[in-house]
Amino acid sequence: MNDFVLCIHGGAGQPASIFNDDRPRSKYLEVLKQSIEAGKKILEKNGSAIEAVEASINVLENCPLFNSGFGSALTHEGIVEMDASFMNGQDLSCGAIASVKYLKNPISGARLVMEKSPHVLLVGDGADQYCQENGMITVTNEELIDDFRKVQLEEAIKNNRLQLDHHDEHDNSSEKKYGTVGAVALDKHGNLAAGTSTGGMTNKHKGRVGDSPLIGAGTYANNKTCAISSTGHGEAFMRMVTAYDVSAQMEYAGKSLKEATDFMVHQKLPEIEGKGGLISIDKDGNFAMPFNTPGMFRGIATKTSAEVFIE
Ligand code: ASP
């Protein structure tokens, strides 16, 4: 049996800018630790990469500090619209949902679509309805809203800004904040899986969908190469088809995971001013978590360690 590896992220950007008395740095570290431990526990007991990815992401979705599930960023109208995707590297099966409004845990909805539906991507009411009919926990849209997000939206509207999470003081572009959650895992059976879940951007147009629910942009997993979950300026990640590009560099150009992810994050994305990062594990258990922003909430677990980082 192989050794397992698990990586998580909670968004890239300038994380320090988001800390305050109500949202202390220590709390972020504590929840990242809970997330990594939740997935690690599963992998230690020979559980699947899919189970581990879902468990780690559920912890972050349930915490209002992160931009997914409860505490998601708000549209211009003050509504939560969430996106998520899941991919199984064993057979390339995948599932995604976009612009859902009533799911407690969108990543579990994406897994449901992957495992039960004949489709890959469901959006809007149809996605909410499918998940509800198949037993997913639903809530009201209001229940997903944290007061912090209302203040953030007011500021964004006042400044006429479209915002990702985690303010970056040194970034003069109109999109100033990043945030999203994701996980990738290699289990003891040698299978890879990846998942990503987000509320998208503050003050986004209703119906805007980013990279996170798009297989190949925000999420990709293939047992032949690697598993990837992205975070950052979604439009740039879509234009670069980021997650699949890393896998393709490995498959067709023989690059290592480190070479492929560094090329993407430090060379390709900057060509179009794409800010963000990604977490990745290859089929041999190597991992890389590069970012081109001041920081990225992230964590890594192996048989012998579990660590979380912010800067
Ligand atoms: N990539 C996400 C989006 O554009 C946001 C993020 O990662 O923070 O919706």
Image (cartoon, rainbow, N blue to C red):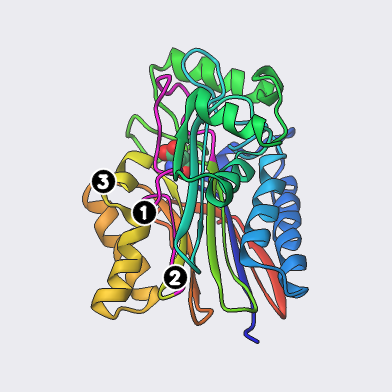
160 or 132, nearer to the observer: 132
User: Would you name the residue on which mark 1 appears?
Assistant: 216
Query: Which quarter of the rendering shows the N terminus?
Result: bottom right
3D distance between C-alphas at marks 1 and 2: 12 Å
Image point (76%, 52%), residue name = 30
| Residue 259 image offset from top left, x and y in percent | 33, 74
Labels 1 and 2: the sequence-earlier one: 1
Q: How many marks?
A: 3
Image point (70%, 28%), residue name = 138
Image point (77%, 67%), residue name = 41
Query: Which quarter of the rendering shows the C terminus?
Result: bottom right
Please tell me whether mark 3 sits on a helix, a strand or a loop. Answer: helix
Taking the magenta stretch, the answer to whether it contains residue 210 is yes
Asked if residue 22 is positioned above or below residue 47 in the image, the reply reads above
Q: Main secondary structure of the magenta part?
A: loop
Q: Is mark 1 within 8 Å of ligand 1?
A: no
The quadrant of the rendered image in which ligand 1 is seen is top left
Asked if residue 280 is positioned above or below residue 116 in the image, the reply reads below
Asked if residue 36 is positioned above or below residue 136 in the image, the reply reads below
Q: Is the C-beta separation of discs 2 and 3 under 8 Å?
A: no
Left or right: where 247 falls relative to 284? left
| Residue 162 image offset from top left, x and y in percent | 40, 25
Left or right: where 255 falls relative to 167? left
